[in-house]
Amino acid sequence: MRRQLTHDIHNLIDRGRDRQLRLAVTGLSRAGKTAFLTSLVNQLRHAGIDARLDLLKSAREGRLLGAQRVSQPDLGIARFPYDEAMASLQSSPPQWPEPTRGISELRLQLRHRTRRAHGLLGSTGTLTLDLIDYPGEWLLDLPLLEHDFLSWSESQLAAMGEARQQFAAPWRQAVQAHAPEDAVDEARLAAIAEHYASSLRDAREAGFSHLQPGRFLLPGDLQGAPVLQFFPLPGVGEADRQRLETLPDTSLYQTLAKRFRYYQQHVVKPFYRDHFRRFDRQIVLVDVLGALNAGPERFEDLSLALSTLMKSFDYGKRSLLNRLFAPRIDRLAIAATKADHVTADQHGHLVTLLESLLAEPIKDLRYADVPVRAFSLASIRATDAREIEENGKRQPVLRGHGLKDEPLLIYPGDVPSRLPAPGFWERQGFSFTAFRPLAPADGALPHIRMDAALEWLIGDKLR
Ligand code: GDP
């Protein structure tokens, strides 16, 4: 008890002296969180030795002395599997790390020299950097707090587009065999819920992102728990409210409504209260290129998912989040990942495309005075830039290896500089090929603009 207290007091003092920072990394599945955090830890571990971090001022000025891993403060949270990720990247042939599926954490201690006037170096300082990785899918649940079960059911069914309806057909068939007043036993309920969860998983496999509830896709330690065994009820609406609310506790409607409330209180809220509220800085990763590759319907869906996800960072005074949890994130980065999938001349377009994809949320953030900056980056660069000559013209191309280790030399095409017009999809000039990581070399992992993102996210704490 006393030791914990001393520990907490030290944490508080460090924070007071600006020496502690909690940096959270999120994004939807396959956005590149695991690769990003692995690279971030790797770059900082190699800072001052062989990492290329010229855009991080303290590194450029030779003031960043290095970073060490220290034991994490929250013993109840999984450790971010850095060693395992590095082992995959260093295997032969190299492989991408296994993605993380829940929340995980890692603490680094950075040592740096402070800067004095006239370029003189000052004393050494330390910055304790807590890195937290969590699924962006969990943020898709924030709007669910503004609903009760009935209005949530209505909203979910209304949002189900044609393609989603197809995935949901077996669930619909199962649920329509029951009326809201029926008493439905546990096993049957679990079976219908599994149909629902599996329709969400199929939709995600097919490239859709705007899916709720988020924990159905990434249950973490709640796998198989009854709190995840609910689903929207088709065919009920506001007009039925009075009748539905008088149904007995054992009815299908009341059972689902109870689980929905439990999910709100015991799954969604605790995440915001216990974790989210304590983040100082945040980076949101987006696989823009993957969505471009998947076609207009998926791209549109990603855009919807992102505007929902970004609501968690809208701290307008009247926002739901501010009313509930008073978060304190004071700086935000959004990044289009996997920039090494396109040639360098396209990187500028990747940033403007990301900005137009997030135009509305960015406006809200600026209004709420949360500083936000957009980047394009490759956490772990898997291609080399080359040039070839074709019909007397020089053409930039990418060289690397495919996931089956086959050598590739390609020009992947142009990235549109803003939201693609319908014509773009017809003459789709873009084809996204996955590369395996480059063969390991001595030194830090190769990257594109990780240093720029780091300067924005932690640079001011290393002055
Ligand atoms: P997560 O689900 O958000 O943790 O995503 P991961 O970090 O596991 O990334 C998903 C996949 O995207 C990886 O397996 C890689 O195939 C690819 N990827 C991630 N980052 C990069 C990158 O910087 N460059 C390239 N070429 N591919 C990447």
Image: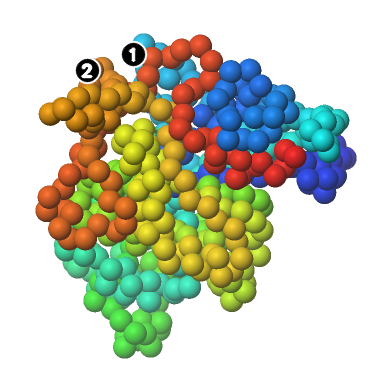
Seen from the viewer's position, the closer of residues 344 and 86 is: 344
- Give neighbour class at mark 2: few <14, some 14-19, many 20+ (Cα, 10 Å): few
Instruction: Of the two numbered discs 1 and 2 on the same chain, state the one appearing first in sequence.
Output: 1
Which image quarter: residue 8?
top right
Foreground mark, 1 or 2, reads 2
Residue 128 x %, y %: 73, 36
Residue on which the image places disc 1: 93
Question: Dot 2 corresponds to which residue?
Answer: 406
Q: Quadrant of ligand 1?
A: top left
Identify whether 181 is placed above or below 95.
below
Q: Residue 159: horizontal and vertical position, in percent?
A: 28, 68
Secondary structure beneath label 2? loop
Between residue 134 and residue 39, name the one nearer to us.
39
Q: Where is residue 218 in the image (x, y as percent from the top left)?
A: 41, 46
Residue appearing at x 69%, y 33% in the figure: 58
Q: Quadrant of the C terminus?
A: top right
Residue at left offset 41%, top offset 28%: 381
Q: Nearer the viewer, residue 241 or 16?
A: 16
Kind of element beneath mark 1: loop
Residue 49 seen = yes
Can the viewer see residue 69?
A: no
Mark 1 CB near ligand 1 (8 Å cut): no
Residue 187 % position (x, y): 31, 53
- The quadrant of the picture occupied by the N terminus is top right
155 horizontally vs 81: left or right:
left
> Image point 61% across, 35% down: which residue?
56
Amino acid type shown at disc 2 = Glu
> Is 263 situated above or below 435?
below
